[in-house]
Image (cartoon, rainbow, N blue to C red):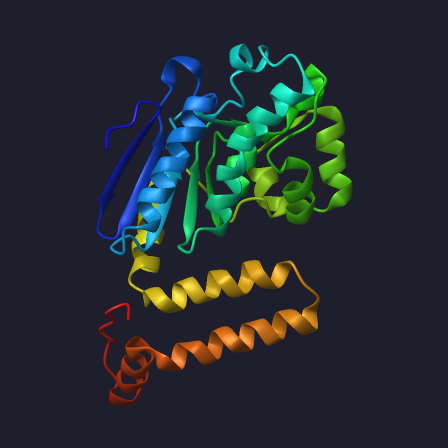
Amino acid sequence: MKYKTIIYNKAESIGAITLNRPKAYNAINIAMLKELNEVIFEIEDDVEIKVVLIAGSEKYFAAGADITEFSSIKSPAAAYDFTKHLDVFHRIERLDRPVIAAISGFALGGGCELCMCCDIRIAAENANFGQPEIKIGVIPGAGGTQRLPRFIGMSKAKELLYTGDMIDANEAYRLGLVSKVVSVESLLDEARALALKIARQPGVALRAIKLAVNGGMDVDIKSAIAYEARCFEMLFSTEDQKEGARAFIEKRKPVFIDK
């Protein structure tokens, strides 16, 4: 399927999504949200995809919501209709495959919220992050007030949300919002190398890790550890677990088949 606001390619077990509204600084509009939703459905049904990579352009990961479209919202009811499309962010977060964000340039508003839905965030040196919604009289509507405090702590998150200020890549790394900062030129190579490294792991175990981590974050620690144990136990029904154990004993590299 051909998309208009994103580019989607797959190779070597990696599904690569590139935000593609260059004239609008990759601002997120309803059309893009719909296409993201469609491509996530496509990925969910594709057993060959083990890792997903999301990127933007060199100068803009995503500059936020499309203000031209945003300004047409005239009532809470219309805002509700708009926010229904934002559920795709939650679907990305809950996708049963690892998702890596490769962030170059500005990741503001919805762009920052989108990258926070990903499992791993790698930033180029020119990346800037922020939730500037307060400057137009609203608050983040796609998880910014909820995910940002979980990543960087409540005090700093409130400061950024109250002021609308941006932080650069190095500060984002210091705060734990991103896991790595690399040069602009090497960003996609670094992100793809990590995606390939992850894609070599057994697919069922990868999905179990994401289920255990995401599911455990929503409950108390006792329930989370019990949930982890069930995920651990389930893996002993897989061929990859048996192959991994044999390969370890035989001192060779395992050959996983994702079953």
Q: Residue 94's x, y, as percent?
A: 49, 51
At 40% across and 77% down in the image, what residue appears?
235
What quarter of the picture does the N terminus occupy? top left
At 76% across and 36% down in the image, what residue appears?
158
Residue 80, compared with residue 38, is above or below; it is: above
Q: Residue 228's x, y, as percent?
A: 55, 72
The answer to whether 195 appears left or right of 147 in the picture is left
- Residue 189 visible somewhere in the drawing: no
The answer to whether 28 appears left or right of 146 in the picture is left
At 71% across and 31% down in the image, what residue appears?
160
- The total of numbered circles placed on residues is 0
Between 223 and 55, the one nearer to me in the picture: 223
Residue 138, compared with residue 197, is above or below; it is: above
- Residue 224 visible somewhere in the drawing: yes
The answer to whether 161 appears left or right of 171 in the picture is right
Residue 146, compared with residue 185, is above or below; it is: below
What quarter of the picture does the C terminus occupy? bottom left
Between 128 and 259, the one nearer to me in the picture: 259
Which of the 4 quarters of the picture holds residue 97? Answer: bottom left
Q: Residue 155's x, y, as percent?
A: 78, 41
Which of the 4 quarters of the picture holds residue 138? Answer: top right
Q: Residue furthest front?
A: 77
Q: Residue 153's x, y, as percent?
A: 72, 47
At 36% across and 52% down in the image, what residue appears?
194
